[in-house]
Image (spheres, rainbow, N blue to C red):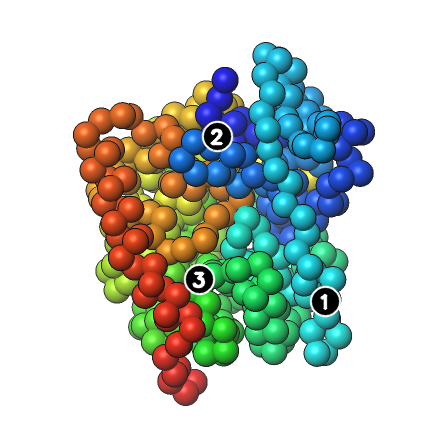
Amino acid sequence: MLNACELEIDLFCKGLRIAPSASCYVQEARRTRAGLGSGLELVVPGTFKDVWVNAPVVEGFAARSPFVLRWQSGSFFIEDEAHWFQYPVQIPPAPEWYGWRTSDGVPMNQVAILQGTYLGVYIGPVCRYWTAESPENCAFCTTGLNVGSSEVTHKSVRDVIETCIAAREVSGTTFVHFNSGYQGGRDLKMARAFVKKVKKNTGLLVGVQLAPVAELDQYDELIDLGADHFSFCFEFMNQDYFRRLCPGKHRTLGQQAFFKAMEYTAGKLGKGRVSGEIIAGVEPIGDTFRAIDRITDCGAFPTVCIFRPLRGSRVEDDPPARYEEMRAVFQYMIESCIRKRVPIGIAPNIEVSLVVQPTDALYLAPRTLGTGVYRLYNSVLSTLMRPFFYWKMRHPAPAPAL
């Protein structure tokens, strides 16, 4: 049988069918942000940690999956019809605050969404790559189809603050993640008010994932306003794939802009507080290994998305990633983190269902002395830092004026 992380990887690669016995007990999948949240949120119990998965259910390849979600005797389980194994899983209920509205009457579930235990908020208008006269949006993205339908187009700072408070109080959320599509160079300036006001009013840990800017001192300003984490989506290490599948990013930014911003912010914030985001399962696996090393070399951690041919994207008919290759990718990822001593899993209660996290990939790490020391290192750091994180969330420092 597969361990919790292996099952997570295989579900991302093959998707999940929902049996009639289970369909009435699960909430409808919603397309949000870049579209990756279009799956079913579930939790796979594990031996040393549970694993959150946003399992693909609406994409074409999921209809052919050997994995079937069933409900029997009050419990959910996934049956692997290819091998006749059964895996118990949990389906988290929709949070109560999804049915609430902000003081301006906006449904909170159109302001932000839980993807695992962390809160995702798309800020700003639709990505400019989608709205150009000749669209240059990334081939795998569906942001332009979601913003304005599954999510409100314009989100006020007040709406976001109220939703963050609801998620913190009801769901125990500790981390809010702001992202947006390309905004023509004003990306970080657009985020300032959100970072400052949310940090001041909620104390949550704040992550920012926006297009890189050349004026690197803008990152210093966001750090001063309370940003705790930065993420940079350069998607592919192979330049031919980057140019072909990310035409807007290639023309306006280039790969080097992502690398410079990632290295700069990692130097400012320290190891483990910046991530580089890539897509695995499209470019040759050797290029994915090189991307992982480029990320960990500067003290950042890899956020590796398994390729998902989303409905409505230009690559919706492409084949999904292969399990065997993806397992090798995530074993390489965790071994790279171990070699570079990149800390993982230090902040409390952050489980991301859209990707295989480095903490999930510990299931794949070789059982060596080095792995044991690394796990102990992370455990000690987490234990020492946890009181500080919670104190900081309850006593946020005053942010400077904009």
- Disc 1 marks a residue whose amino acid type is Trp
Residue located at (50% from left, 73% from top) = 202
Q: Are marks 2 and 1 in contact (CB under 8 Å)?
A: no
Residue 258: numbered disc = none
- Disc 2 marks a residue whose amino acid type is Ala
Q: Are marks 1 and 3 in contact (CB under 8 Å)?
A: no
> On screen, 337 above or below 228?
above
Label 1 crowd (10 A; few <14 / some 14-19 / many >=20): some
- Disc 3 marks a residue whose amino acid type is Gly
- Left/right placement of residue 249 relative to residue 226 reads right
The residues bearing labels 2 and 1 have C-alpha atoms spaced at a distance of 34 Å
Kindly state the secondary structure of the residue where label 3 is placed.
Answer: strand
User: Can residue 264 be seen here?
Assistant: no
> On screen, 257 above or below 18?
below
**381 and 295: which is toward the camera:** 381
Residue 396 on image: x %, y % = 40, 76
Q: Circle 3 is placed at which residue position?
A: 207
Kindly state the secondary structure of the residue where label 2 is placed.
Answer: helix
**377 and 257: which is toward the camera:** 377
Residue 137 on image: x %, y % = 58, 51
Q: Circle 1 is placed at which residue position?
A: 100
User: Can residue 292 be seen here?
Assistant: yes
Q: Circle 2 is placed at which residue position?
A: 4
Label 3 crowd (10 A; few <14 / some 14-19 / many >=20): many
Quarter where residue 354 is shown: top right
